[in-house]
Structures are given as structure tokens and as C-alpha cells.
Image (cartoon, helix red, strand yellow):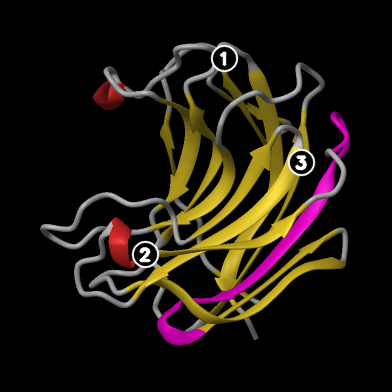
């Protein structure tokens, strides 16, 4: 893999607990009830995330690798929660939509989803939601998991996706993936969820993003 130089920028409530760098490489994100980015003060979403400023090209094969650990605590009760995602760069005049790829947490079970639309300006009516994987058992709190993603964005039908956890293949998909945008998607990681009166903390390390060799 030809690694990109990462340029991570933070989106959080700017609280003392929102983000911490541990031992130079472990990124810790903590989200508490009411933690919102200033520009989303009146919304029903909460987030403590980082995003990488690299935009990816449609049709190219990319690989993302990292390790993650959910700290011990209450079982997640959010109606939706995203741990890692590729999010779209919306075209002028395009309404906001959910990410084309996301690793989610439902309860404490892992879920992998994709979305796609070939429309020039996508809407909810022409966006296809595809559930690629659902865990049968909850993740173990306090345990590190290695995640690897290979992805090709192709909103017209030539997309590809493979996702491994600890070298076990979870998702293997070929078909439409992503949105028909002028500029390609970019990567985000942390905790992003529907407003929930809980505290959750997640750690990530060894993040690598690049073109697959």
C-alpha cells in the first residue's frame, strides 16, 4: 500500500475529554451527553471525530487499516452510532445525506453499511442503502480489534468493498457504491451518534490510508 500523509483535523465539543493523544499514536475520543460541535448546537447529533483532508478518487482502489478498542462502559443505546466512515463532499445544491461507507455500532454489535446514488444531485428517493454485515455477537469492551478495508467508489455500478476484522473477511461486495460527486469522499473516525444520555470512549491506533498496491 502507498500510504498517504495524513492530515487529521478535529470536530468535537472542545471539552477537556473530547480528544486525547496517548503515547504519541493512540487517539482517544470520548463523547458525553450533549457534546456537540458549535455549528451543530441546535441539532440532534453528537460527535467527537477527526477527519482526514485527503479526498479520494472514484474508480481507484484504496486501503484503510487501523486498530480500535471500545472502552468498558454501558452498552451503547444510541439509535445510530458511527465509528469510522467515508463521507461525501456535497455538490453545490445537493442536500445532506448519510455516508457512502460506515462502520457502525448497533448496541455493541458491529455493522457495516454502504449507500449509493448515480444521480448528479442525489436525494433520499434515489439513494440505495445496503447493509453489508451485521455482527451476531457484541464486541468485547476493552479488546483491540484490527480492521482493514479495501474500497473502490463506483456509483454507477463498478464499486468494490472488502472488510476484514482480525484477518477474518466480514464483507465482500461488488456493485454500486458511493455518490456521483464532483469531489470524492474523505475519511472520518471517532464517535458520531444520535443524541443519547450516555458516555462512550473509543481508542484508535495505527491508522493508515493509501492506494492499494
- Residue 206 in picture, x, y percent from top left: 71, 51
Residue topped by disc 2:
127
Residue at image location 83% in from the left, 48% down from the top: 145
Point out the tag, 2 or 3, that comes first from the N-terminus.
Answer: 3
- Residue 102 in picture, x, y percent from top left: 56, 54
Residue at image location 78% in from the left, 37% down from the top: 69
State whether residue 59 appears in this view: no
Quarter containing the N terminus: bottom right
Looking at the rendered structure, the secondary structure element under dot 2 is loop
18 is within the stretch colored magenta? no
Along the horizontal axis of the image, is 68 left or right of 179?
Answer: right
- Residue 76 in picture, x, y percent from top left: 69, 25
> Residue 172 sits in which quadrant?
bottom right
The stretch of residues the image draws in magenta is 139-158
Q: Residues within 10 Å of mark 1 (few under 14, many from 20)?
A: some
Residue topped by disc 3:
109
Point out the tag, 2 or 1, that comes first from the N-terminus.
Answer: 1
Q: How far is the residue under mark 2 from the one under mark 3?
A: 25 Å
149 is within the stretch colored magenta? yes
Residue 17's disc is 1
Amino acid at each position: 500500500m502507498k500510504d498517504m500523509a495524513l492530515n487529521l483535523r478535529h470536530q468535537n465539543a472542545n471539552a477537556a475529554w473530547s480528544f486525547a493523544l496517548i503515547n504519541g499514536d493512540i487517539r482517544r475520543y470520548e463523547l458525553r451527553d450533549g457534546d456537540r460541535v458549535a455549528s451543530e448546537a441546535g441539532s440532534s447529533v453528537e460527535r467527537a471525530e477527526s477527519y482526514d483532508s485527503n479526498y479520494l478518487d472514484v474508480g481507484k482502489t484504496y486501503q484503510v487499516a487501523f486498530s480500535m478498542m471500545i472502552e468498558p462502559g454501558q452498552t451503547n443505546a444510541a439509535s445510530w452510532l458511527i465509528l469510522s466512515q467515508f463521507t461525501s463532499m456535497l455538490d453545490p445544491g445537493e442536500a445532506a445525506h448519510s455516508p457512502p461507507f460506515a462502520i457502525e455500532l448497533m448496541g455493541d454489535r458491529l455493522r457495516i453499511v454502504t449507500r449509493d446514488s448515480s444521480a448528479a444531485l442525489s436525494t433520499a428517493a434515489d439513494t440505495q442503502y445496503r447493509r453489508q454485515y451485521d455482527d451476531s455477537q457484541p464486541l468485547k469492551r476493552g479488546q483491540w480489534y484490527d480492521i482493514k478495508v479495501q474500497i473502490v467508489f463506483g456509483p454507477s455500478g463498478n464499486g468494490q468493498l472488502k472488510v476484514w476484522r482480525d484477518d477474518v473477511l466480514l464483507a465482500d461486495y461488488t456493485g454500486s457504491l458511493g455518490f456521483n460527486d464532483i469531489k470524492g469522499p474523505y475519511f472520518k473516525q471517532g464517535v458520531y451518534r444520535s443524541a443519547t444520555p450516555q458516555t462512550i470512549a473509543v481508542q484508535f491506533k495505527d491508522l493508515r490510508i493509501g492506494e492499494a498496491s
